[in-house]
């Protein structure tokens, strides 16, 4: 059986990959994918801790996180498509429409 700390280390590594991707890339699609990777890292840790504690609450919370991630992806991609139609770019540096 795999120990709990291996799952937590895996979750931390995946989360750091997501943070690194979000902070270094300027493509908004890559940024949304990095957010999804971070949410999946949280899901890994919740499922592993839930299994370790023999409690179903963490696994139920994972279903809510997956639902929120799906809604975030749908709304985020709709916003990206709208911005691409107006600006013809998906780079964050070139989108300054909301600046005052």
Image (tube, rainbow, N blue to C red):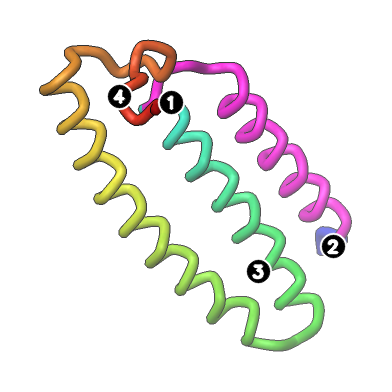
Q: Which residues are magenta?
A: 5-28
Q: Which residue is mark 3?
A: 47
Element at badge 1?
helix
- Residue 84, above or below 6: above
Give the foreground label among 4 and 3.
Answer: 4
Q: Residue furthest front?
A: 100
Q: Which comes sooner in the sequence, label 4 or label 1?
A: 1
Q: CA distance from mark 4 to mark 3?
A: 40 Å
SS at circle 2: helix
Which marked residue is nearer to the observer: mark 2 or mark 4? Answer: 4
Relative image position of residue 2 (x, y in whole percent): 82, 59
Closest to the camera, between mark 4 and mark 1, is 4
Element type where label 3 sits in the image: helix
Q: Which mark is residue 4?
A: 2
Horizontal side of residue 44 vs 76, given as left or right:
right
Please tell me in which quadrant of the rendered image residue 59 appears: bottom right
């Amino acid at each position: 059986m795999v120990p709990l700390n291996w799952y937590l280390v895996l979750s931390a590594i995946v989360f750091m990959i997501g943070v690194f991707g979000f902070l270094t890339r300027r493509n908004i699609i890559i940024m949304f994918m990095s957010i999804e990777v971070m949410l999946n890292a949280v899901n890994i840790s919740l499922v592993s801790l839930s299994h370790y504690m023999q409690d179903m609450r963490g696994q139920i919370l994972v279903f809510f996180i997956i639902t929120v991630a799906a809604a975030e992806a749908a709304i985020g991609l709709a916003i990206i498509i709208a911005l691409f139609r107006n600006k013809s770019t998906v780079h964050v540096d070139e989108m300054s429409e909301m600046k005052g």
